[in-house]
Amino acid sequence: MSTATVGLHHLFEERRALEDYQGGMPRWCKGCGDNAILAAVQRLCRDEGLKPEKTVFVSGIGCSSRLPHYMRTYGFHGIHGRALPIAEGVKMARPDLHVFVNTGDGDCCSIGAAHWIHAIRYNMNITVLLHDNHIYGLTKKQASPTSPLGTKSNTTPRGSYLDAMNPLTVTLGVQNVSFVAQAVDWIPETLFQIIQAAFRHRGFSFVRILQRCPEFVGNMFEPWVHDPSRMLMLTHEDGIRPGPALQKIYRNQQEHDPSNMNRAREIASSEDPIPVGILYRDSAVPCYEDLRHAGALRTADSIRSTLDAELDKFTVWPQ
Ligand SMILES: Cc1ncc(C[n+]2csc(CCOP(=O)(O)OP(=O)(O)O)c2C)c(N)n1
Ligand code: SF4
Ligand SMILES: [Mg+2]
């Protein structure tokens, strides 16, 4: 092959279209915000030129956790609440892979809460997308930890009794937190920008995405969808900047430096207006896989000889 042909061949191989990342036909309900999240991650994969064979989407259980089926990459549809430890295992074994996690508010903040807290502290280079629809969708409408007080559901027919948990303030409260952002499914351009910034951050990037579930909580986000003045756009050179068209619609903007933790916590506490953008970023926090020299740790031979040495310690040799 001539040099020019090799170059062309290379170009052909590297440039992929959206369709190259599209897997099975999504089965989410019409109008479900998960569709917008899927579109954003497929665009991210294309724009960042991610090799499908080097990319893994890991999930737990829930409507949102079906996302890996709809990607044409590697995927692992795990068990309820366990997406994060599975993803951490993948990253430890293969730190060269791009690892994404799709998890629901039940999956992450309820049954998976212990894993969530420790995953923040381990700060592995994983992009985590929390599809927060404030309800258990797959199991047909039970209150979740993020359901607002008074939410009527199958488990709380008289309305939920507890104040909602705020996944942003929880994440910001954990040692070693390195990236926290909030997006909403109904502003696709900003959703994409935020997911892209999360992917480019080296560390545990946590993006809470407010996601509409028209099937079970159709009115949950309607006031904010229809009134842009109730959205707060966080802008900064180290954060995101909405394009001119969006700036005209979302006039409620605020410069926020993502290195400012105290301010990030204040902003994270706001439910109305809903803040959108990058709340916090610290690129200096070490990643666990680097501290443990992941990938170089284990070969079949090294595991066998370590185990042999360990077992030999307890062997009673015949006299
Ligand atoms: C150990 C275990 N407990 C309970 C369930 C039932 N279950 C499946 S999905 C789910 C909650 C899903 O809610 P969420 O994580 O918010 O995802 P969504 O469907 O809203 O996207 C529950 C309780 C299960 N599959 N496994
Ligand atoms: S039940 Fe809700 S979260 Fe699940 S697919 Fe339908 S709209 Fe989406
Ligand atoms: Mg949910």
Image (spheres, grey):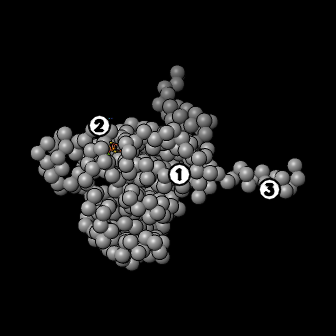
Instruction: Tell me, yes or no, whether the two marked residues, 2 and 1, touch with CB atoms within 8 Å.
Output: no
Instruction: Identify whether 103 is placed above or below 236.
Output: above
Mark 2 Cβ and ligand 1 under 8 Å apart: yes
Residue 139 coordinates in the image, percent (x, y): 29, 37
Mark 3 Cβ and ligand 2 under 8 Å apart: no
Q: In which quadrant of this rendering is ligand 1 seen?
A: top left
Query: Of label 2 and label 1, which has the lower sequence position?
Result: 1
- Packing grade of label 3 (10 A; few <14, some 14-19, many >=20) is few
Location of mark 1 (residue): 42
Residue 180 coordinates in the image, percent (x, y): 39, 63
Furthest-left residue in this view: 158
Residue at 59% x, 47% y: name it. 19
Q: Secondary structure at mark 2?
A: loop
Amino acid type at image mark 3: Gly
- Residue 139 bears which disc, if any? 2
Residue 41 coordinates in the image, percent (x, y): 50, 53
Residue nearest the viewer, comparing 33 with 10: 33
Residue 1 coordinates in the image, percent (x, y): 87, 49
Query: Of label 3 and label 1, which has the lower sequence position?
Result: 3
Residue at 79% x, 54% y: name it. 8
- Packing grade of label 2 (10 A; few <14, some 14-19, many >=20) is few
Q: Secondary structure at mark 3?
A: helix
Which label lies toward us, 3 or 1? 1
Location of mark 3 (residue): 7
Residue nearest the viewer, comparing 107 with 277: 277
